[in-house]
Image (cartoon, grey):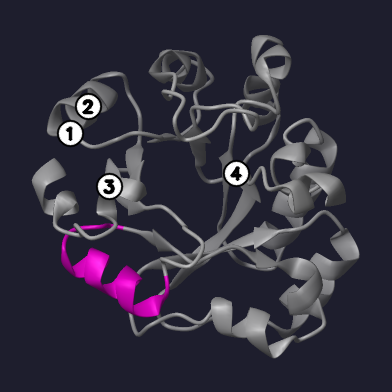
Amino acid sequence: MKFQLMLAPMEGVTDGPFRTLCHQKGADLTFTEVARVANLARLKKGELERIGISGATPTQIQLAGAKLSEYEKFLAAFEAESGFQGFNLNLGCSSPEFVRQGIGAMMVKRVSRVNDIVNLIQKSGSECSIKLRLGMNDYEKGKGAYLNLIEAVDASFFIVHARTARQTLDDPADFSVYSKCVDLGKSIVANGDIRTRKQVKELRAQGLSGAMVGRAAIGNPEIFQKLR
């Protein structure tokens, strides 16, 4: 795929109007706030509202969950809106609640289950990408948990947040991991501390397929134009 600039999914930030604004300012692809498949399968109104898409704004719906039966039930009832560009699996959220439930970043090591979910979504006729961290901690990062998943799963692209789940946003993102990811021959999108045109230029030179911007877009949607 051509190099794309993407707006990261952010809780309480990336609602429909903000996604549309960022797209107008140069974001090629946007993502909804994360929605729990368990709630979507039960047709909970609040959760369904989270995945609503504003007009034709290119949007992927980010999902969190581990049970195949819940994905099957949700997908059977799902009707795509005009801007829908597929689903994105959240393998990056490190909130205590997600960790306790074994979803989000806890699923980076569950390669077989992730592969089953991706296959299920693709068989339903939708594209499926993955957003992941480097593992729960430095040990999993060192063992290449993120590389194992990228190599084994055939998602459309992988957004790699270059931190472990135990790290905070105050810890610097480790851009050195991207060359290992690209070497696997998959489409890789960088995420974490991306703010400058120099960074984007370097990422393109390494062979990445895109860059995802989060905090730098809050209050400054024009950053997408500047990064070009």
Residue at the (35%, 29%) spot, across then down: 208
The CA span between labels 4 and 1 is: 28 Å
The CA span between labels 1 and 3 is: 10 Å
User: In what element is the residue under mark 1?
Assistant: loop
User: In what element is the residue under mark 2?
Assistant: helix
- Which of pointers 4 and 2 indicates the residue nearer the eye? 2
The CA span between labels 1 and 2 is: 5 Å
Indicate the amino acid at tag 3.
Ala
Q: Position of residue 56 (x, y in %)?
A: 33, 80
Residue position marked by numbered label 3 in the rendering? 216
Q: Quarter of the image holding residue 121?
A: bottom right
Q: Please report contact status of discs 1 and 3: CB closer than 8 Å, yes or no.
A: no
Q: Quarter of the image holding residue 91?
A: top right
Indicate the amino acid at tag 4.
Ala
- Which of pointers 3 and 4 indicates the residue nearer the eye? 3
Horizontal side, residue 169 vs residue 88: left or right? left
**Upstream in sequence: badge 4 or badge 2:** 4
